[in-house]
Image (tube, rainbow, N blue to C red):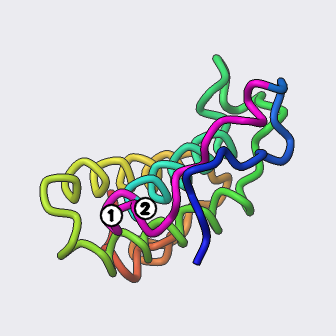
Amino acid sequence: MTDHSQPTPVPGADSPADAEAPVRALDSIPAIEVISRAAVMLMSAAAEKLGLADEDPDASPRRDLDEARRLIQALAGLITESAEYLGPHAAPLRDGLQSLQRAFRESSAIPDEPGKGPGEHLTGPVR
């Protein structure tokens, strides 16, 4: 059994104070929080890969539609398979997913057929 009362050094911490910050034990985090955090991370990463953080997404140096497709697909699977546990968080996460799916469709030079875009086999066609 691990003693969680002592601070655990954090690899890659920016300062000595950060390195001594206590790490929250995974066993104390509710599953819904882990799922929600993972979904938000996938959403953020997909938005970056779509270039949505830049003023002109079409000219974004970070734009990578292949990577965005993978992230959106993973997000769709996570949200679809955990919907029953998400409670009030389900609707905003689904809305965010649909926004990313639409943005992906609009970004594609040759858009996928309805129902064939990333995650659409799980969520249904996005228009």
Instruction: Please tell me which residue lies in front, 117 or 48.
Output: 48
Q: Which residues are magenta?
A: 17-33
User: Label 2: how many residues lie within 10 Å, few (<14), some (14-19) or many (20+)?
Assistant: few
The reply to whether dot 2 and dot 1 touch (C-beta < 8 Å) is: yes
Residue depicted at 45% across the width and 69% down the height: 27
Q: Amino acid at mark 2?
A: Val
Q: Which mark is residue 30?
A: 1
Q: Looking at the image, can residue 124 be seen?
A: no
Q: Position of residue 101 (x, y in %)?
A: 45, 56
The residue at the point 66 percent across, 39 percent down is: 48
Along the horizontal axis of the image, is 10 left or right of 115?
right
Q: Nearer the viewer, residue 81 or 24?
A: 24
Answer with left or right where residue 87 lies relative to residue 76.
left
For marks 2 and 1, give the CA distance. 7 Å
- Where is mark 2, residue-wise? 34
Q: Left or right: 16 with respect to 49?
A: right
Residue 44 position (above or below residue 60) = below
